[in-house]
Amino acid sequence: MSVSFTVAPLRACRDILKELRAVKGPGYQRSPAYRYVMDQFRHNRITSEKLCRSQQDLLHRASSYLCLLQSTRLHLSLHAEYHGEGSTREKGLGDVARMVGLALPTQPGGKGWE
Amino acid sequence: MLRNVLRLYNSLPVGCCPLITSQTQTRRLLECRRTYSSATSERKKFYQDVSISQGEGGVFEINLDRRKLKTPGGKLFTVPNEALATAVATEWDVQRDTLKFYAMHMTTLCNTALDNPTQRNKDQMIEASLKYLETDTICYRVEEPPGLVQLQKNEWDPVMDWIEKRYNVVIGSSSNIMGPTIPEETKDTFRQHLASYNFWALTGLEYVITQLKSVILSFGLIDQHLTVEKAVQLSRLEEEFQIHHWGNVEWAHEYDLQELRSRTAAGTLFVHLSSESATMKRKLLQDLEFPLPRKPTIKTPLLSKHSHH
């Protein structure tokens, strides 16, 4: 088998549910996604698969979905931090410069025209 | 008139317009622009509940409160199976206050498959996908710095070996600007393989190829040889090398990484879920050997039978 990931089914399931909870809040157990994910993992455990192919399918899809949930959440939080409302225009010039690791120059003598 | 048409042409999103040749096409483009422009701006969330229901012909629909979701082109939004519907419904369900369409990749992919705004058929999509093979990321090697040369050899060569063995083709890599010459037999093999995918799966696959800038990595992902994270890392190998050397800039590198991961993950999931009917048939045949009490596919109280509104 050339599958290169090592996430166990239990951990994949648990991580997906953690993501769902993080992104949906307290009602996440009532969501269609929660039900579907639990169904998939339960059904795959009960049927004793002669071929491990469907288990690999499920694991890969679970890993992809987990990546989708995590990366979307992180992308949105980075967007809010660096490109969203109040992240640049409402801040002062000094704060924005500090965001990219620069600082405004300090001129001890003051600007020439002041 | 022509100036207005050209202005419209320039403002449409890339990849959306063929050459304007007739009035009907111009009208179609204007309609296309009206409906698609609303998909890019942010809107306030206008619903409370999201649910799935089954419609005519076994397709699934998304309901926002009591209204059925429609595509930007005005068609009823339908997906072929429950898994896809669940993924799309979840995307709509987790929106707060404003709808961030740029983060709803599954919905976008379904819209593209349903509306087909570029009006292409399967063969055209296969050709467009294979065109990326000539400029595949994995095939382009640098000659310096030596650290990057070694990294490319260590990371990309195994994937190249895998695909050449799996599909029994010759691709090869090159370090000159023209790139490798791909033999016609290789392209034919891939063409045949891609023809076995349905239209929806091809939409997803082409999306993954354009994100990763590599046909080989996309095949690796779809054939489950690579995970999404690994495929993205291999696609960004040179950037990772530079980041390792010069440091990571969060507002650029991290942002791009997470965005690429989310798009690639969505595309991969879309391909796998769109090809699901084949897997379902295989599982049904297996279940005949181990008969289980078959659960009905729809059993949530939120579901409602199809009804016109």
Image: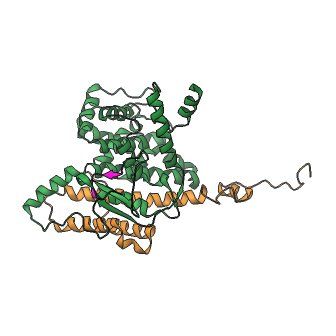
Chain colours: A orange, B green
| Residue in the image at 45% along x and 25% along y | B22
Q: Is residue A15 visible?
A: yes
B94 over B124 or under it: above or below:
below
First to last magenta residue range: B76-82
| Residue in the image at 50% along x and 61% along y | B45
Q: Position of residue B58 (x, y in %)?
A: 23, 54
The answer to which image quadrant residue A83 occupies is bottom right
Instruction: Say whether residue B78 is magenta.
Output: yes
The answer to which image quadrant residue A42 occupies is bottom left
Q: Is residue B142 visible?
A: no
Left/right placement of residue B244 relative to residue A89 reads left
Instruction: Say whether residue B96 is magenta.
Output: no
Left/right placement of residue B260 relative to residue B223 reads right
Give the number of callouts.
0
Direction left: furthest residue: B289
B264 over B182 or under it: above or below:
below
- Quarter of the image with the N terminus of chain B in it: top right
Q: Position of residue B52 (x, y in %)?
A: 33, 61
Q: Position of residue B267 (x, y in %)?
A: 37, 49
Direction bottom: furthest residue: A26
| Residue in the image at 24% along x and 32% along y | B189
Left/right placement of residue B251 relative to residue B263 reads right
The answer to which image quadrant residue A26 occupies is bottom left
- Quarter of the image with the C terminus of chain B in it: bottom left
